[in-house]
Image (tube, grey):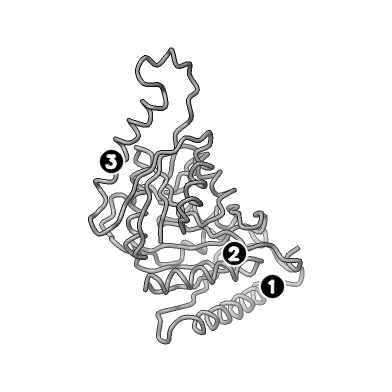
Amino acid sequence: MRLVVGYLATDGGADALALGVRLARTLGAAIDVCMILPPDRVLPSLVPTGGYEDVLAEQAEKWLAEAAATVPDDVEVATHVVFDESFAEGLIGEALRLEAEVIVVGGAGGGLIGSHSLGSVVNELLHSAPVPVALAPRGIRHSGVQKVREVTCAIGTRPGADVLLRAALRASEAAGTPLRLVSLVALDPLHTTRRTEDTPDTVRNRAQEHAHQTLEVAKAVLPKDFPVTSEITYGPTVEAAVNKLDWHDGDLIMVGSSRLAQPRRLFLGSTAAKMLRVLQVPMVVVPKEELTEHDG
């Protein structure tokens, strides 16, 4: 198994590398640390020695060597320099070429959202990546936690939820980490989609039934006695509901791609975006499968 880390010589790059190392240790994977550089946009005469791309690549190789030197000996690491007009597209291309399971990125520029920073690169990834994207919260580089402690999976009822559940089950079993299945229920009608006949009681009852069914599916798939739990949290908003959950350093949350996503592509939905505003743990966004006729 391989994980691609999108690296910049910044704090956000260090956060991405730290999360990559944690995931690699947990899953027994190798990491590929990638720097995506813009191609030559200047006249060769303006660069007196060696050409623009050569100079840039040489500097990138130095940064990557320094980054790789910080990776513990028990994690296999390789480095790559790629020239591409788009950082996101270059990273996706490398992930596909290397047959990586996950792309790991940190906050880089752009609007700040909680402890995550969704810059233009991350936004582009979350709209176009064909593999799961792991978002490193700001400051994770300072954590001493070596492996994922517990996987939380935020399960909804919309199309694609079964894809997310299967991904979470595979990840938890491969990592040997406990799995927590969570239903987040926003009770304020202004913050959620409702049926016209809904009341708070019917919303709660439906959430409980769905949580029970999901837990039974998980128990049927996972080995006997595997640590899996189910939890429902309520709040006036998604943010309030997710804040009621207990979180620890080393936890990770998995969410599904929005129903607006193209087949096998990501699109960060409104619920996941709201979670990002308040969460201090890494988030993994999982793409949808091919749409079926039933999904429309």
The relative height of residue 184 versus residue 16 in the rendered view (above or below) is: below
Name the mark on residue 186: 2
Does label 3 or label 1 sit earlier along the sequence? 3
Q: Position of residue 212 (x, y in %)?
A: 56, 81
How far apart are labels 2 and 1 at the CA level? 12 Å
Q: Amino acid at mark 1?
A: Thr
How far apart are labels 3 and 1 at the CA level? 58 Å
138 sits left or right of 69 in the view: right
Q: Residue at x 52, y 80 (%)?
A: 215
Q: Residue at x 49, y 75 (%)?
A: 231
How far apart are labels 3 and 2 at the CA level? 47 Å
The relative height of residue 136 versus residue 51 in the rendered view (above or below) is: below
Q: Which residue is mark 3?
A: 65
Q: Nearer the viewer, mark 2 or mark 1?
A: 2
The relative height of residue 219 versus residue 162 in the rendered view (above or below) is: below
Q: Residue at x 55, y 56 (%)?
A: 272
Viewport quadrant of the N terminus: bottom left
Q: Amino acid at mark 3?
A: Ala
The answer to whether mark 2 and mark 1 are in CB contact below 8 A is: no
Does label 3 or label 2 sit earlier along the sequence? 3
Q: Nearer the viewer, residue 32 or 226?
A: 32
Query: How busy is the neighbourhood of tag 3: few (under 14 within 10 Å), some, or many (20 plus)?
Result: some
- Quadrant in the picture for residue 209: bottom right
Q: Nearer the viewer, residue 286 or 290?
A: 290
Query: How busy is the neighbourhood of tag 2: few (under 14 within 10 Å), some, or many (20 plus)?
Result: many
Q: Position of residue 132 (x, y in %)?
A: 51, 57
Q: Position of residue 18 (x, y in %)?
A: 33, 51
Q: Which residue is mark 1?
A: 199
Does label 2 or label 1 sit earlier along the sequence? 2
